[in-house]
C-alpha cells in the first residue's frame, strides 16, 4: 500500500475539528430521521460507530454506498468477489433506512449491513476499531475525508468505485487543490464511470497511475427479484389486460404519469397502470393524488384487491419492483421528469422491459445514452409524449418486442465488464491474498 502523496492540509484540520464539535447536532438530526423510519435504537447507534453485530473472523471487505442505487449496484460485485475470494467476509454501509431494507432483502452470502458512521473522529475511530476492514471500497461520490484518512492510518486499502462527480463538485475541489490532492491520495485505486470523470479526477490531483476509466457499475446489477406468488396472483386478477408501470417516481412525476394514463385509457379502456413511488412512505400523498384524479385504484399496503374496474394499482411497498417489471413490458423510469438525475436504467432493462424516461438523466447519462442508442429506450418530456410512446408500443407489439430485446441485450453486454473491475480490485488491493 503506497503512502499518501501529500500531508494533511489546514483545511482538512479545520474540517476534522469542526466535525468533532458538530457531532451532537448531527446525531440529533440523524437519529430523529432514523427513529421516524422505525429504525431500532441499537441500529441507530451504528451512526455513532457503535456496531450492532460482531466482527466475523478473517478478511473483511467493506463497501460504503450513500443510498439505494449505490448500495444495490455493488451486490453483484460482492457476489463475484465472494466467488473469487472464498474466505472473505463483506460489510455494506449506507445512510438510509430504505437502502438498509433493500440490501437486507438481497443480501449476498457472507455479507452484513450497518449504517455508516458520521464522518467525525469519534464515530469513525469506533467503526475502524471494531470492524478492522482489510479494504474499503467507496461508491460513486462518497469522498468522506475522515473515513478515508482514518482508514489509511488503520492500514485499510482503499478504492473509489464507479466514480461520479458533478461539474459543481469538481469545480469546488479544484479551488482547493492541496486538499483535493491529499484526499484523493488516500485511494490505491480510482475507477471512474467514463473517461471524462477519470480526467476530472486527475485534474483534481489524483495520481494518474491509480485512475482508470471503466463503465457504470450499475450495469452489473442483477435483474430485481420476482415474488412468484404475488406475480401469479396479480396475473390471475389482471387476466389479458395490458399493463404498464410508472417506476420509482418522485413528487411532481405522478401527476404527469397519471395524466398520460388518462389519455391512454381513451384508446385502451382496460389498461392498468402500476404506480410505484420511489419512497413508499409517500403512499398517502400519492393516494391523495389518485383520489383527486377520479381514477379507480387499489393500494398494495391496504391489501385492496385488483378488480376489472381497477385503473391504477398503487404499489407503495419496498423491494417488489422486479415483480411489477415481470407483469409489465413497459416502464417509465422516475427521477427523470424532475431534476433528480435519473435512477438505474439497467434494472428494468435486465428484466426485459422497454424503458421510457424524461430528460433529467445526469446521474447515469452514459447508461441512458447507450441504452437509447441500442434501441432499448425512448426519451420523452411531457404527459402527451409519454402517452404517445406507450400507446405506440401497445398498438405495435412487434416494435415493443424489438425494444425489449434491445434493452435486455444491451444491459447484459454491459454486465460483462464486472470481471475487469474484480481483477483490478484484487490486484490493487491485494484481495486474493487476504
Image (cartoon, rainbow, N blue to C red):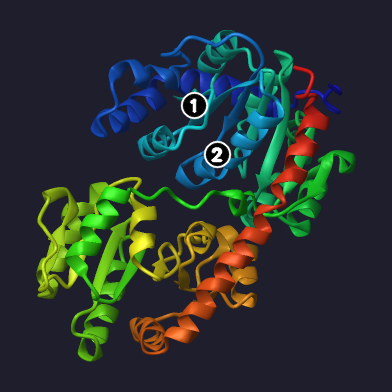
Marked residue nearer the N-terminal end (1 or 2): 2
Indicate the quadrant where residue 68 lies.
top left
Q: Nearer the viewer, residue 169 or 88?
A: 88
- Left-right relation of 292 to 374: left
Task: Determine whether the residue tagged by mark 2 lies in a helix, strand or loop.
Answer: helix
Quadrant containing the C terminus is top right
Q: On screen, 397 above or below 138? A: below
Question: Disc 1 versus disc 2: distance between alpha carbons?
Answer: 17 Å
**Residue 248 at least partly seen:** no
Q: How many marks?
A: 2
- Left-right relation of 322 to 429: left
Q: Nearer the viewer, residue 257 or 301?
A: 301
Q: Residues within 10 Å of mark 2 (few under 14, many from 20)?
A: many
User: Residue at 45% of width from left, 13% of height from top?
Assistant: 51
**x and y percentages locating residue 165 in the rendered image:** 65, 51
Is there a contact, CB below 8 Å, between mark 1 and mark 2? no
**x and y percentages locating residue 398 in the rendered image:** 47, 85
Q: Nearer the viewer, residue 51 or 72?
A: 72
- Left-right relation of 245 to 163: left
Which one is in front in this view, the residue at disc 1 or the one at disc 2? 2
Q: On screen, 142 above or below 132? A: below
**Residue 133 at least partly seen:** yes
**x and y percentages locating residue 119 in the rendered image:** 54, 25
Q: Name the residue under label 2.
A: 75
User: Residue at 47% of width from left, 71% of height from top?
Assistant: 355
User: Residue at 37% of width from left, 40% of height from top?
Assistant: 98
Task: Determine whether the residue tagged by mark 1 lies in a helix, strand or loop.
Answer: loop
Q: On screen, 242 above or below 320? A: below
Seen as rendered, the residue at the extreme right is 209
**x and y percentages locating residue 27 in the rendered image:** 38, 23
Mark carried by residue 116: 1
Amino acid at each position: 500500500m503506497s503512502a499518501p502523496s501529500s500531508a494533511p492540509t489546514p483545511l482538512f484540520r479545520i474540517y476534522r475539528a469542526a466535525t468533532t464539535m458538530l457531532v451532537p447536532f448531527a446525531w440529533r438530526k440523524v437519529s430523529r430521521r432514523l427513529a421516524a423510519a422505525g429504525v431500532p435504537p441499537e441500529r441507530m447507534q451504528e451512526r455513532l460507530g457503535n456496531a450492532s453485530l460482531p466482527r466475523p473472523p478473517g478478511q473483511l471487505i467493506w463497501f460504503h454506498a450513500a443510498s439505494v442505487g449505490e448500495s444495490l449496484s455493488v451486490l453483484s460485485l460482492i457476489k463475484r468477489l465472494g466467488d473469487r475470494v472464498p474466505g472473505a467476509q463483506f460489510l455494506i454501509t449506507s445512510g438510509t433506512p430504505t437502502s438498509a431494507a433493500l440490501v437486507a432483502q438481497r443480501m449476498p452470502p457472507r455479507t452484513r449491513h450497518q449504517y455508516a458512521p458520521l464522518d467525525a473522529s469519534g464515530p469513525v475511530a469506533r467503526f475502524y476499531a471494531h470492524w478492522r476492514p482489510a479494504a474499503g471500497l467507496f461508491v460513486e461520490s462518497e469522498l468522506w475525508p475522515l473515513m478515508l484518512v482514518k482508514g489509511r492510518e488503520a492500514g485499510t486499502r482503499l478504492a473509489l468505485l464507479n466514480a461520479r462527480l458533478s461539474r459543481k463538485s469538481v469545480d469546488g475541489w479544484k479551488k482547493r487543490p492541496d486538499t483535493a490532492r491529499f484526499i484523493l491520495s488516500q485511494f490505491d485505486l480510482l475507477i471512474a464511470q467514463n473517461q471524462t470523470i477519470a480526467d476530472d479526477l486527475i485534474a483534481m490531483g489524483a495520481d494518474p497511475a491509480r485512475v482508470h476509466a471503466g463503465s457504470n457499475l450499475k450495469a452489473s446489477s442483477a435483474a430485481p427479484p420476482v415474488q412468484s406468488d404475488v406475480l401469479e396472483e396479480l396475473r390471475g386478477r389482471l387476466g389479458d389486460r395490458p399493463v404498464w408501470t410508472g417506476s420509482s417516481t418522485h413528487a411532481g412525476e405522478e401527476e404527469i404519469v397519471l395524466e398520460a394514463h388518462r389519455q391512454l385509457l381513451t384508446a385502451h379502456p382496460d389498461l392498468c397502470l402500476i404506480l410505484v413511488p420511489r419512497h413508499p412512505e409517500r403512499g398517502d400523498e400519492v393516494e391523495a393524488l389518485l383520489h383527486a384524479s377520479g381514477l379507480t385504484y387499489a393500494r398494495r399496503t391496504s391489501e385492496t384487491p385488483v378488480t376489472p374496474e381497477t385503473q391504477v394499482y398503487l404499489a407503495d411497498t419496498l423491494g417488489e419492483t422486479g415483480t411489477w417489471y415481470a407483469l409489465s413490458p413497459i416502464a417509465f423510469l422516475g427521477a427523470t421528469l424532475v431534476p433528480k438525475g435519473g435512477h438505474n436504467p439497467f434494472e428494468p432493462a435486465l428484466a426485459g422491459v422497454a424503458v421510457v424516461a424524461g430528460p433529467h438523466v445526469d446521474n447515469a447519462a452514459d447508461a441512458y445514452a447507450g441504452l437509447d442508442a441500442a434501441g432499448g429506450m425512448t426519451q420523452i418530456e411531457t404527459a402527451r409524449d409519454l402517452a404517445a410512446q406507450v400507446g405506440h408500443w401497445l398498438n405495435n407489439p412487434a416494435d415493443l418486442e424489438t425494444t425489449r430485446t434491445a434493452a435486455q441485450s444491451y444491459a447484459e453486454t454491459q454486465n460483462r465488464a464486472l470481471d475487469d473491475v474484480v481483477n483490478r480490485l484484487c490486484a490493487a488491493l491485494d484481495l486474493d491474498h487476504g
